[in-house]
Amino acid sequence: MEAADVVELIMTMRDLGNDHSVVEAKRAQGGPPSRLWETISAFANTRGGVILLGVDEKHDFAITGVSDPAQMEMHLANLCSNSMDPPVRAVINTVAIEGAQVVVTEVPALPRNARPSFYKGEGPYGGSYIRVADGDRHLTDYEVGLLIADRGQPRDDERPIENALPGALDPDLRSNYLRLLRREKPRLFQSGDENEALRLTKVLVQSGDDPEKLVPSLGGLLALGTYPQEYLPQVDLTFVVYPTNESGASSIGGARFIDNVSIDGSIPVIVEDAMTRLRQRMAKRSVISGVARRDVYEYPEEAIREALVNALAHRDLGAAALGTQVQVEMYPNRLEIKNPGGLHGPVTVDDLPTAATSSARNATLYKMLEYVPLPDGAGTVCENRGSGIKAMIASLRQAGMSVPRFADDIASFRVTFPNATLLDDETVAWMAGLGQRGLTDSQVLALARMHHGEVMKNASYRQETGVDSRVATAELRDLVDRQLVTTTGQRGGATYQVASSTGEQEERSDSEDRDLDPTKVELDGIDGLAESPLAETEVPTLALPVWEALSAGPRSRTELELELGLEPHEVRYRLGRLRERGLVRLVGEARSPQGRWERLTPSTPRP
């Protein structure tokens, strides 16, 4: 890492006022910090990160330097290579900044099947950490056990349920399952008795040491059981509808929730019953597809069904997690689906929208569900082809909606669907007023996002629209040439935002040519580094999305994170910029769920 890169990191932390999820600063003038291994473990077990020694966090990240950088580097190398298990292959170097020596350690993220990274002196259960926001959190025993189990292929779905008998399987599900097996794999399953076919596919497994006694496996019971909850009471799904955007907060009438039910049965039954409940609670809205208007549910059924199947089929089935349910929570501004157990295998949250392959924690159960029909006859529970997430995202794009957000915290996995239609009536009217012809569907979707206040990069354009890099570059350039979008910065740092008028774009371009330092233009695409060219009394460019979101009324910080798809530290920073300029104020306690940020106008008394 070069000195200029380190300076950018320090500038970002100064703007934020604290460390963040991928950077940790330590003064370290008296020698190596005593428990530096906690941060090394945390970064290795999360997304990787950078440790800066010789930067004082408590004094606005002043550059203090270290007295003996060579000795510090040697200590770090020994700590990473010899004291961590598995060894951490960090890149360590020293850079000179403002006449001081700063030791930089770049900690790579370990592959999931090599985690947890832990300090040998404390062992895996005492010395494993994960990075959360700007701090290091000790992993729980459950999380450590889950990571260790995930190093191989878990077999919990093949575990025999000793007190169940083959009669615990639903006769219709069993019959239809065998029919599909014989149709799709006639050479394997056309002959032989039914129990043999169920044994080969692990629906039935051997009980104890008796080779003649077959009982349902855990996966077989979940896929084909009449009532699995007789043996596994908590392996079900809870469905809760909240009246407000915060769980636990009461509505004006005092109700904490509008609907609260537990849905039992086999996985195909749970999926259908949950979809029925969701349809009852989902509103319908009009969306534009090409030149036609059509009515759809506020969340596309295909996307929600896929998320439900994934949650039920990929959940952790280890003994420690059998008391935890799959949770579906509907709020006015979002829908969340959460299951115990994070991602399994090499796929990461960042890979999910584009990954060509999938990795199933419960491979045997997932294989069964490929041949289990849904109760309504609309196909099987899953296709097991690794294309489910792509289909989910495609259905959301077709409905003109934001892509879902995925969160993996080892112990659980969560999918969040924002309740925000991009192509609403106001946006459609705005686009019609542009008088443009020949725009692609991906350009329309991106313009809608930018019209709603989002500042995009080439990478975010690709993620939101599904086009490749070459197409994204050409389409963004076309939007700029049409004077619909303005661009700031260069190359990978270039950002794009909607131009409200041709005159505004020309005025901005002239202003940039006359007044802006080229180095500031290059940094404009990096959160928190570039100063806005706007006047001090105007809204900072970087904070415009937050400012626009608050135009609809006061919002909590959590609501802003969900609406805008920003990280917590990004929202904090943007609110800070707005507050510095007297443009917003906080109503309520800062750490309270009831705390709301609201816009200030000239007629609003300043706090």
Image: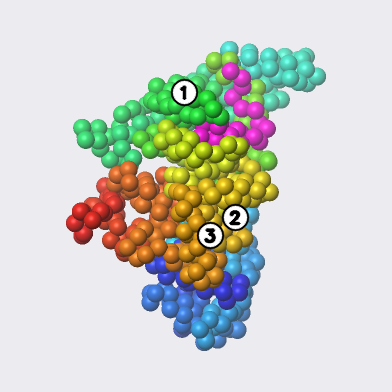
Q: Earlier in the sequence, mark 3 or mark 2?
A: 2
Residue 528, located in which quarter of the rendered image? bottom left
Residue 446 picture location, percent across and down: 53, 43
What residue is rendered at 45% in x and 21% in y? 276
- The kind of residue on which mark 1 rests is Asp
Instruction: Compare marks 2 and 1 and give the one earlier in the sequence.
Output: 2
Residue positioned 40% across, 30% down in the render: 239
- Residue 393 part of the magenta segment: yes
Q: Nearer the viewer, mark 3 or mark 1?
A: 3
- Asked if the magenta segment contains residue 276, the reply would be no
Q: Residues within 10 Å of mark 1 (few under 14, many from 20)?
A: few
Q: Nearer the viewer, residue 42 or 593?
A: 593
Query: Dot 3 corresponds to which residue?
Result: 488
Which residue is tagged 2?
A: 115
Q: CA distance from mark 2 to mark 1?
A: 46 Å
Q: Which residue is mark 1?
A: 295
Q: Name the residue located 26 percent from the left edge and 47 percent from the top edge.
A: 594
The magenta segment = 378-403
Name the N-terminal-most of marks 3 and 1. 1
Give the answer, above or below, for where 54 lies relative to 141.
below
Three-letter code, disc 3: Thr
Q: Is mark 3 in CB contact (under 8 Å) with mark 1?
A: no
- 10 Å crowding of disc 2: few (<14), some (14-19), many (20+): many
